[in-house]
Image (cartoon, helix red, strand yellow):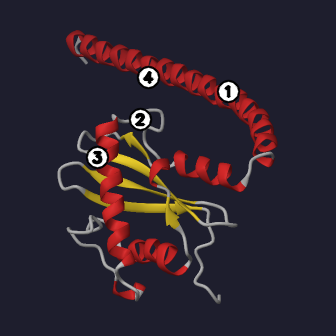
Amino acid sequence: MNPRKKRRLMTALVCLGLLLLTAIFITAFLNRQAKKKEKKPEISQTTSSESSVVSSYSQSEQTPDEKNYRQARATLERPESLVSEDKKNKVAEALRIAVEDIKKHPNTADVSGTMDNHLSSTSSPMVLTFAMALNLAGYRLEDSQTEVFKSYSDDVLQFICVLSKDGEENSYFVGNYNDYTAQLQIASYHGGNIRVRGD
C-alpha cells in the first residue's frame, strides 16, 4: 500500500473515530437532560397530591350547585375573561329566543335546532336535552345569571347559562356562541335533575 493511500485511510479512520466520539458525548448529554426532566415531574406530583388533598377537602364543603358550577366553568377556554355587557346581551338574547321557541313545542321530540331559534349549531341530542330540561323537567332559564366569556377564537364567545327549579340543584349548560352567525352551540351540561317526570 502506498503512503498516500495509508494517509487517506488514517485520516478517514480518525474522522470516523471523532464522529463516533461526538455521537457518544451527545447521546450521554441528552440522556442526562432527560433524567433531569424526569426528576422534575416527581416533585410536581408530590405537590399535586398535596394540593389534591386540600382541594378534596374544600370540595367536600361545596354545595352541589357550587361543585356543578366549578365543573362547568372548568370546561371553558378562558374562564377568567368576561366579555363586555353588549356581547353578553347578544348571547343572552339568543338564549331567550331559543328557550321561547322550545316552550312553543309541547312535544319535545318536535324541537330541533334552526337558524331562527339560534340552535342550528347545537347537536340534535343536546337540543333535545335542553328542551327536556325546560319542557319536561320543569327548569327555567335564569337570564340574569348567564355568564359570557372570551374564547381562543375571535368570532366565538363561550357561555354558561343557568337553569333552575325549585327544590332541585341548578343545571349549568355550557356552550359556544358564534358572533358572525349568531348561533349557539350548547356543548355540555353539569348538574340538575333532567329526567323526565315519572322516571
Do tag 4 and tag 3 residues touch (Cβ < 8 Å)?
no
Of the two numbered discs 4 and 1 on the same chain, state the one appearing first in sequence.
Answer: 4
Mark 4 and mark 1 in contact? Answer it, CB < 8 Å: no
Q: Which residue is under mark 1?
A: 39
Q: Position of residue 117 (x, y in %)?
A: 27, 68
Residue 185, horizontal then vertical, whole percent: 34, 61
The residue beneath circle 2 is 82
Circle 3 residue: 156
Secondary structure type for disc 4:
helix
Q: Nearer the viewer, mark 4 or mark 3?
A: 3
Which numbered disc, 2 or 3, marks the residue that appears first in the sequence?
2
Circles 2 and 1 in contact, beta carbons < 8 Å: no
Few, some or many residues within 10 Å of mark 2 (<14, 14–19, 20+): some
Q: Look at label 1 and name its amino acid.
A: Lys
How dense is the environment of label 4, judged by Cα within 10 Å: few (below 14), some, or many (20 and up)?
A: few
Give the answer, above or below, for where 28 lies relative to 73.
above
